[in-house]
Image (cartoon, grey):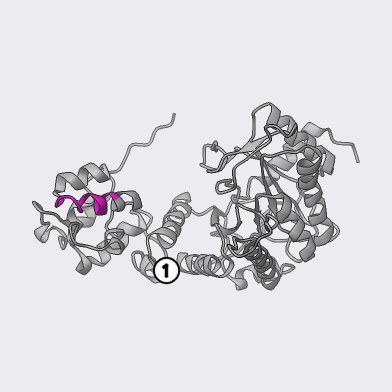
Amino acid sequence: MATLTLRRKLAILVDAAKYDASCASSGTEKRSSAGTGGIGSTEGSGICHSYAPDGRCISLLKILLTNFCVYDCVYCVNRSSSNVARARFSVEEVVKLTLDFYKRNYIEGLFLSSGVIRSPDYTMEELVRVARSLREEHQFAGYIHLKVIPNAAPELLVEAGRWADRLSTNIEMPTDIGLEALAPEKKPSEIRTAMANVRGKLDEAGPDKKARAKKPKFAPAGQSTQMIVGADAADDGAILNRAAGLYSGYKLRRVYYSAFSPIPDASARLPLKAPPLMREHRLYQADWLIRFYGFDVPEIVSGGEDGLLDLVIDPKLAWALKSRARFPVNVNRADREMLLRVPGLGTRSVERIIATRRHHSLRLDDVARIAGTIDKIRPFIEAVDWTPGGLTDDARLRARLVPPPEQLSLF
């Protein structure tokens, strides 16, 4: 086999990594190499992002160590039976690329995943070697995100968390049935065990006011996961139920939703085309409602039909239109939880409303000024000088709030 140049390997392994969406880098600790003789830094709020035209983060050097893989997952372009070009980096090559890209200001960190080669332990050990070399030999203080290989030895996870800012273990499919059908060599229980092990170490590394000795750090940016949307028959309700269970059970920072992308030489068991990207977008909005707005999954799903979210309007507005008996909400008396359910009011707007009404009663113009918009809010609130009357129950209200059609452009 001809020897591949480093540039050719990079082309293959960057392309192979583009399907993994769980690459956001926010939430890690502030760290700087100033005064250490090393290189790199992170800010307390995470590193800066840049985005590809489809919205995905590309600010990290996002690569696979190799796209060789012993597994044959139907939905994966890197499956063992796939007819794609193969390549493999050495540990030293990944370290050199990361440092070189960083010095050129192309990236601010590394996202490193891999196909499974030889065994989960061997693959995880190679990933850990990259992170250890960057941290110990080069004092690299930039961001590192490592992918956890399920079924790898617990001591390798401990070492991975020592060097990496974030660890992620992909849950892959929304249901165990879907995973067993499309990736029969992977065991849902092994994936959950890996996530549970990471959570256990995160808990051990958490703050303890009574402890005198400083605890060893472990993945300060926490753990995340990714689910593929649209490769099987799971509806949005099943996807969100799995996400809610992962947040509560494994203390995840983020669940990423990745719309299935048709791959070369795809199995007949996969859909012929990708689901609409708007479905992925609505799932992210629904995820936000679960984490920050106090919604539960049945409430969110009730805004759509047949277990699927409404693709035309956002999940919060969809729920409000089907729950009109709970509106209008008086902005001068309602509690925070109910204000958060008003379409068009975000968490910051609600906090400002609560702070402002301590000093004077709010009028409609006050709400408009705080929220920056009023059209979506007006039918669902009462203020000193405003009551929606029959507008809340108007049969044409949905049509009024649906965004007007836009002429698409070819350029």
The residues colored magenta run 352-362
Left or right: where 335 falls relative to 185: left
The quadrant of the rendering that contains the N terminus is top right
Left or right: where 195 falls relative to 344: right
Please say if 276 is above or below 142.
below
Q: Is residue 341 magenta?
A: no
Q: Nearer the viewer, residue 156 or 53?
A: 156
Q: Nearer the viewer, residue 38 or 149?
A: 38
Residue 355 visible? The answer is yes
Residue 173 percent across, percent down from the top left:
60, 64
Residue 387 percent across, percent down from the top left:
10, 56
Residue 345 visible? The answer is no
Density class for disc 1 (Cα within 10 Å; few <14, some 14-19, many ≥20) is many
Residue 7 percent across, percent down from the top left:
78, 32
The quadrant of the rendering that contains the C terminus is top left
Q: Is residue 358 magenta?
A: yes
Q: Quadrant of residue 70?
A: bottom right
**SS class, disc 1:** helix
Please say if 201 is above or below 219.
below
Q: As drawn, which residue projects farthest toward the top? A: 104
User: Residue at 54% of width from left, 38% of height from top?
Assistant: 51
Tell me which amino acid carries mark 1: Val
Residue under pointer 1:
297
Please say if 297 is above or below 355.
below
Residue 256 percent across, percent down from the top left:
55, 55
